Image (cartoon, coloured by chain):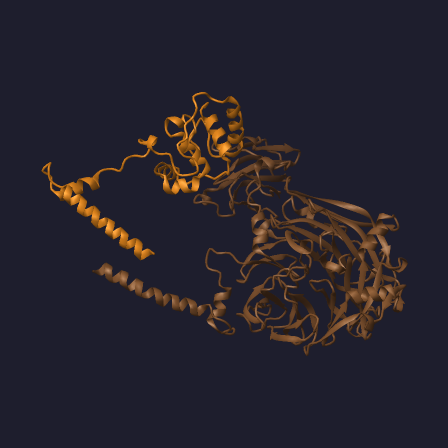
Chain colours: A brown, B orange
Amino acid sequence: MNINKKILSILMALPFLFVIGSCSQGGNGGALGSSVADRVYVPPGEHDEFYAFISGGFSGQLAIHGLPSGRLFKVIPVFSVDAEKAYGFNEETKPLLNTSFGQIPWDDSHHPDLSQTNGEIDGRWCFINANNTPRIARISLSSFETEEIIELPNSAGNHSSSFVTENTEYVVAGTRFSVPIPQRDMPIDEYKGNFKGAISFISVDQETGRFDLSFQVIMPGFDYDLAHPGRGASHGWMFFSTYNSEEASTLMEVNASQNDKDFIAAINWKKAEELIASGDFETMPTEYAHNVYDESTHMATSTMKKEVRVLDASKYPGLVYLLPTPKSPHGCDVDPTGEYIIGSGKLSATLTAHSFTKMLDAIENEKFDGDAYGIPILNYDDIVGGVVQSGGLGPLHTEFDEKGNGYTTFFISSEVVKWKVGTWEVIDRQPTYYSVGHLMIPGGNSRKPFGKYVLAMNKITKDRYLPTGPELCQSAQLYDISGEKMELLIDFPTIGEPHYAAGAPADLIKPNQTKIYKLEENNHPYAAKSESETRVERDGKEVHIYMTTIRSHFAPDNIEGIKVGDKVYFHVTNLEQDYDVPHGVSIIGANTSELLIMPGQTETFVWEPKKEGVWPFYCTDFCSALHQEMQGYVRVSARNSNVPLKWTLDGE
Amino acid sequence: MKDLTKISTILMGLTLTVFLFSCGGGDGKSAADRIKEQAQMEPADPYENWQSYDGVGPIQNFTLPGEIDQEMVANGKEVYDIKCTACHKAEKKFIGPSPKGILERRTATWVMNMILNPEEMVQKDPIAKKLFIEYNGSPMANQNLTEDEARAVLEYFRTL
């Protein structure tokens, strides 16, 4: 009877559940409606629909979030050291942070961009720029590790970077600050006409992703702010917004804001390729570091390069044209068809959409309105395709959906404005909290956007979260853009300053994940690929320990014969071949970080023992029920002692 | 779902009880005594009855050929040396048991499943469960061997 009752009550409850369930599918309840929570809720154990690659700004890193939940999965160290992951601390990754100025532990990362094939994002690599000491990094979307960093000579404040052409032919990086090229000691007030801006074209090997600084275009001494590649019909061109066409060098906020219009510079890089191929270029002596991480040796190397090929824009007719654009344009964005180049005059209220077709026509008919250092200036009225009268203040950046809409952020009026490409009418506007910079639609700067969400990234959060002293987090805000009106769904804190982001459907990236490194493919010169290869070798004051880890012991775990003043290299190979079984290790007094070693990987840290004694080391990443037992000892004797070198595990 | 499971468990329990009671009589013991007796009986030792355990995993009803394939032995030794010796040694009990004479204690199918599917084995297979406790809860690492590699390692074990 009881059982029957139970069954009966379950049956009765079922239709009720259906009713509740169908209620929560509902439409636009606004940000306060419970349906909004459903739309960003990813149940435990389920995956997000999109990856978001959000720049860490002054943290120098790249954060990986899921959308729509906003959950943070990983912070990939790129330009700053990271003790948690031993990045910049272990011997293998130190060379990645080498530059012509020596080892640099920090930078300011701004604009991630994803590799493309035929104008569509392809899930192979993410690129990001270092702003302060100009560099570009390549991150593998299989291993989610930084694999390569190339320094850019002649560049300063590497801001209009890193933007990828539609078949990943080049990652393009423009200088924000113009400087003397080559660098030399000269009076600052002789800036005008003497300082130049370098735009770097870095070619990408389609198999390996390896960089080569193919050439630089040397431009007039403006500030090159942001960029995007042409696509479709405009493929082969690269567009850069500029400010400071005044060529001022002091009190820039006034002196670089004098001209009614600055320029978008259109560079014909197919033409540049022809010049390079025909040998019509100059080779300039310089110095820059090219750092590559090899997944087979688990190790990076740094090479110093000595020269760069340059093309002076003033000397090659047809290479560059200048498109007058109102009021210090910041964002420079190209719509999915490649026809419109949007310049956001950050000191005005309007957006200017230049027409690529009209630009080509003006070039063909030589409708020029003067020149700057020999570079033709086109006539504004001949090339403008439309103007968005937004009603907002301080337009910065635009992304696109696949339905012919543009979405532009307005910093001063803190809002996202949706408008129609072609008719230029404003469709919707939604506030941001607060002071929005960039925004991102997955694939939103490619031929094929995935216009389900737009992510707005804010500089200021004030009262939005629990306060944390004077320093507050910055944030990202997710809007549903599947309907006519945008709808704010969620906001979440970000690391550092989220300048720009790139996004991709999870299905594009998930299938290519590296899960382990195969031991038989480990070519690290100091790997011990089985416990039988573990050993300790002395070479003068240098001691090399070939150590292995597996759940849950080190081999060897008792080491004697180390002396004060030795330089001890722990080369640790993780023998695990199973997914998600890293081991960590460190030892008392090590003046460096832990190691965090993925299955099949070898990493090295250096320990310089300063005191006699017996010093324990242990596994720093919880690995099994016997993790607490994963420990060992190193005996350190006086410099003049005769304790022989000895290493054992369980007495053997 | 939980409720439904509960209900079916209860129903099964009821049937079982009825069945047990109806079996009573014949040898003079009361039904209650029989149940008591049954409860006190040790469960069969899986180590003793190893021949009836093939484990859980991708391998089913595998029997070894009579001849030892020396080429396979060499391949198996190579794989074993790199991926297994951190925990298994032929001459002693180490982190895990010695593989020496393994086919006198386990079926060939069980050995391959233990190599290829250790996580599920220690949860479901009675022998693997008992080993897991005996070896202090030290997990058998899944070293992601292919079936061919596991087969070769087994061939190598025949020579130890």
* Quarter where residue A587 is shown: top right
Q: Is residue A210 left or right of residue A605?
A: right
* Quarter where residue A394 is shown: bottom right
Question: Could you say where residue B58 lies in the image, as x and y percent from the top left?
Answer: 44, 38
Tell me what residue is drawn at x 60 percent, y 64 percent: A451
Question: Could you say where residue A239 lies in the image, as x and y percent from the top left?
Answer: 77, 62
How many labels sit on residues? Answer: 0
**Observer able to see residue A122:** yes
Question: Could you say where residue A174 lies in the image, as x and y percent from the top left?
Answer: 77, 59
Quadrant where the N terminus of chain B is found in the figure = bottom left
Q: Is residue A377 left or right of residue A647?
A: right
* Quarter where residue A545 is shown: top right
Question: Could you say where residue A547 lies in the image, as x and y percent from the top left?
Answer: 56, 37
Q: Is residue A436 above or below residue A110?
A: below
Work out whether residue A410 or residue A151 is closer to the camera in this orientation and state it. Answer: A410
Work out whether residue A64 or residue A84 is closer to the camera in this orientation and state it. Answer: A64
**Observer able to see residue A231:** no
Outermost residue on the left side: it is: B28
Q: Is residue A548 left or right of residue A629?
A: right
Quadrant where the C terminus of chain B is found in the figure = top left
Outermost residue on the top side: it is: B67
